Amino acid sequence: MINDQFYRRRYVISGIAVGVVLVYIIRLFYLQVIDQSTKDQADNNALVKQTIYPSRGLIYDRNGELLVFNQPIYEITMTMRDMGNNWDTLGFCQCLQISREDFDHRLEEIKDKRKNRGYSRWTPQVFMSQLKKEDIATLQESLFLYPGIQIQKRTLRDYTYKAAAHVLGSVGEVNQNDIDRDNYYTRGDYSGRDGLERTYEKQLRGEKGMEVLMRDSRGRMQGSYQNGDLDKTAVAGTDLYTTLDIRLQMLAEELLCGKIGSAVAIEPKTGEILALVSNPAWNPRVLVGKERSKNYNALLNDKTKPLLNRATQATYPPGSTFKTIQALVCLEEGGITPNTLYPCSGPGSTPIKCTHHHGSPVALDKAIEQSCNPYFWCAFRDVLQKDGYGKENEDFRKRYEIWRNDVMTFGLGKKFTDSDIGDQSSGSIPSTKYFDRFYGKTGWKAITIRSLSIGQGEILVTPLQLANQAATIANEGYYISPHLNRNDSMLTHRHDLNIAKKHFETVKDGMHRVMVYGTGRHYAIDSLNMAGKTGTAQNSHGRDHAIFIGFAPVDDPKIAVAVVVENAGFGATWAAPIASMMMEQYLTGNMKRKDLKQRIAGSVLNESVKKW
Amino acid sequence: MRASRNGNILQHVDWITIGLFLALVIFGWLNIYGASYTFDQTSIFDFSNRAGKQFAWIIGSVFLGAVLLLIDYKTYDVLAYFAYGAMLLLLLATPFLAHDIKGSMSWISLGPVSLQPAEFAKCIVALAIAKYMGRYDYKIRTWRDLIVPFALIGVPALIIMVLQKETGSALVFAAFLLVFYRQGMSGYVLWMGVAAVALFIISIRWGGLALPLGTGSVGILSCMLLLTAVEIYFICKEHKMRWQLLILTGGVAVIYGICLIINIWVNVPFDWISMGVVIALALYTVFVSIYWRKYMLLIVAAFSVFCIGYTQACDFVFTHVLQPHQRIRIEVLLGMKEDPAGAGYNVNQARIAIGSGRFFGKGYLNGTQTKLQFVPEQDTDFIFCTVGEEWGFVGSLGVLLVYLFFILRLIEIAERQRNVSTQIYAYAVASIFLFHLTINVGMVLGLLPVIGIPLPFFSYGGSSLWGFTMLLFILLRLDAARMEQLR
């Protein structure tokens, strides 16, 4: 209205205002709509995800006895910023019974950014960890005197019995590999490292929970974010019911004291493992908590190799116990009948000597009873040579392959892949290729591999396979893969053998005779109606291994056992009594032969075996 | 007439502006509550927290506004010079009465509250300027006519900057340049301001960057090329002959071409060559202006020579005159320094706060950046972060548009005055609000260096709220009286 000469300048000034606002709107649009980086930055600033650890599943034996449980441990954390000036260091040290020097040293470690990369004055730092309840009791009462100090609870494994260390396994901190493989884990988490703890890790660990907390600019926690809508509660692990009978397990462990060896007991009808013992073993408690890594290294360096689970990982020649399988395969493949007789000249027999004195000629039942070597050599030879050798040794090699396949149907020469047992060896039943490589296709004959007939030579089996073999015979033609989880789904892993039931009856009869008239008769209990077969396996590592397989009662087998005592001598002397006592324990729920137990358990056959 | 004036002030007052004022104040108050909100907070009216205190200030400001509307409009004109003198005395006295608050000596404490006289100075300076420039015989004819107005804004600005160490509050007086412009000051002054800022930024940002060609720096060469272009533009604009444009640009191009070729064998000091070109052109401009009697061109020549000195001085000013914290703020803004933990912390956290609000915001009182105190000064100078974080793009856009509408409304009011003095005052009000909005929001958005001045009606603080209220309601009072004025 006035000053018309410069009237138009109002538009310049308005234009400046519009221009400025426009530029700012564009900038806002860039920051709030286009640029995506700030959302995460704000969350990183403000949100802290705190993990809530679930309690790990418990482990029980077949009778509901608690084997593995959780013990609370405590961690002391300190937040430097909240500690203030007049902090009573001496009183604090007295509460924890540590020296002033320890305190200062630990404080230096915490503040050293190279050792403790996440150090911040504002957030809690771990001062001491893995403390027992009694360690922190005094401090807990006077906690209010020490601002900035917090006590956090975590859990560790604890064990009711000092037994079954190999089977149960242990829990330890995850390594980088585990973290890369499974994004469930983060640094500092615990997971099952071996045994059942590892196999059933996913079931036992449960599910971690999460709490989203807000942290202010100084790193102080300010409560939960969005009223906890993003929080997740922890789901406790599921308990594991194992097939073990802890009484049987502990008896076997006691009997193997001072010896290197193993014992496996299986319930034949279900394949459930009743006991799985490997000695030397350790008290499972030594691999828990602060001492874990120290003790683990000591176990690792022990020359008796306690960490090796001999029951499933060590392989031995089966010796005479293999004669049971030999008999079954030869009967099935038509090499012999139960009435076939072979002569035996005792220790003067060729090409294989007999170790026992008995009448001649013998039939199969007697041959098993007396563990007659020549009988099984002849039967083996006749089965392999039934069709002659043929062109280029073809027919013989074919027969050998058939024999081998039959033997392997007992679960030998391979791992139980449908089982939940972690570390297994496959053992070995040599293939035609193996002998071809050594002798050439035409260079080997029945006589070349004669030691196979009596379970020596290239045959190697694990104690677990031996026990499964006993169970298969007890079942008269099938087995269920041995397993440790008492879950019915395991029963579907049934394996039927192509060997007629009547043959099993013959062999079972022979094994029964072993316990009545033969090598096992000293340790039989008549009322339990045991069947068994001893073995004395020659080997290149010194004295023979004592081996025994057996089951009881013969008519309705409830337990099948295999025992191996390394470098102990006769199977009848060392393995048979252990197996016999185990059967008694399981079948009667009690072991009455205290003197025998005393004698066997007290015998130290290997001086370097240490009880951990 | 007279009866209706006092009786019906409510009829003549501009209700749109009052509505916008209330909208801004109330929304600002909600955001102060959001910004100072902590977890144990109880009520928005609780006087122990800042939102509660601000509520008291708001009540006071509404009361103040009402009082200002009731005073006779002539009072403001009559008392303008007296108030100006009193204000100068108060500003001078302030540093001696004040406590040191973060290096600033501008706060006087009166019992439980503190007042910042500088916030009220703007209003009083605006009134004095309006009175002086609104005289019926005043007109901007030559630069001499601007001496007094410049003095009126310069003296308080210097006191505030030097004695009170409040650079931000002093800079606000630059807003009056727009007022002078509207009243007839040459537009070149504004352009010179823009050029000064541009040259400053170029010479600081790229002054240390060596040319790939030889001696000299990218910054200096760019400034000189810019000046050369400006000189050629004005010579050809004043003296319209095409051949002249061709010869001048061609000549400059040939000189630089020859230098480039010589540079193959000998290092050419490009800094000096480019300055030489500018000076040569300036001399030619002087010759042209005298020969054709286009004396305006003398200013161009003088400006060019001045600018050469200026670019040399920038570096000196930057390293020796500016205080270290100001220097670092500028370096961070220009991307010469990354310092997210130190000087760049505020700006970076503000960017995160605003950016993480996304399109619709995190919701009122749900901003993690604000609530957890990641942004310092979040309820005062950085209050716009809270808006951005909790109300998102939608909310920030809304606030900016309301502000724009508010400022345009003030310009509208200015233009409808019959009284020159009121118009000048109205433009002063509009310019001051525009300046505050530009500097504050530009700083929060990371487009301008950190200069601590409040966002009107939003930032927490009684002095600034009352200062702006005075500024606005005096205008509304004068505007309501416009029909009574004959001239």
Image: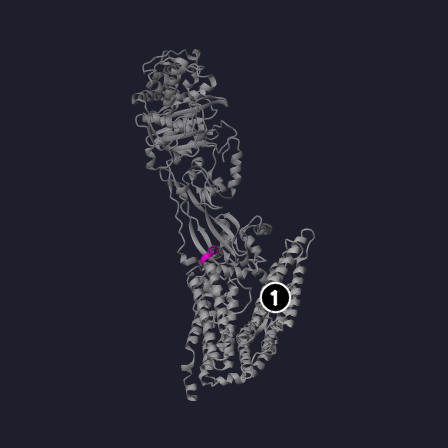
Can the viewer see residue A579? no
Determine whether A142 is above or below B462 in the image. Answer: above
Determine whether B455 is above or below B269 in the image. Answer: below
Which quadrant would the N terminus of chain B be assigned to in this image?
A: bottom left
Q: Is residue B302 left or right of residue B355?
A: right
The residue indicated by pointer 1 is B231
- Which residue is at 47% across, 74% downward? B411
Q: Whole-percent x and y of residue A152? A: 48, 52
- Which residue is at 42% across, 12% downward? A346
Q: Nearer the viewer, residue B114 or B355?
A: B355
Q: Quadrant of residue B303?
A: bottom right
Determine whether A397 is above or below B286 in the image. Answer: above
Q: Whole-percent x and y of residue B447? A: 53, 62
Q: Nearer the viewer, residue A442 or B233?
A: B233
Task: Give SS at disc 1.
Answer: helix
Can the viewer see residue B227? yes
- Indicate whether residue A35 is drawn in magenta: yes
Q: Whole-percent x and y of residue B358? A: 44, 59
- Other residues around mark 1 within 10 Å, as few (<14) / some (14–19) / many (≥20): many
Q: Whole-percent x and y of residue B140? A: 57, 78
Chain at numbered mark 1: B
Q: Is residue A470 left or right of residue B114?
A: left
Q: Is residue B186 left or right of residue A39?
A: right
Q: Nearer the viewer, residue B385 or B200?
A: B200
Q: Which residues are magenta?
A: A33-37
Q: Quadrant of residue A338?
A: top left
Identity of the amino acid at label 1?
Glu
Q: Nearer the viewer, residue A1 or B53?
A: A1
- Indicate whether residue A214 is drawn in magenta: no
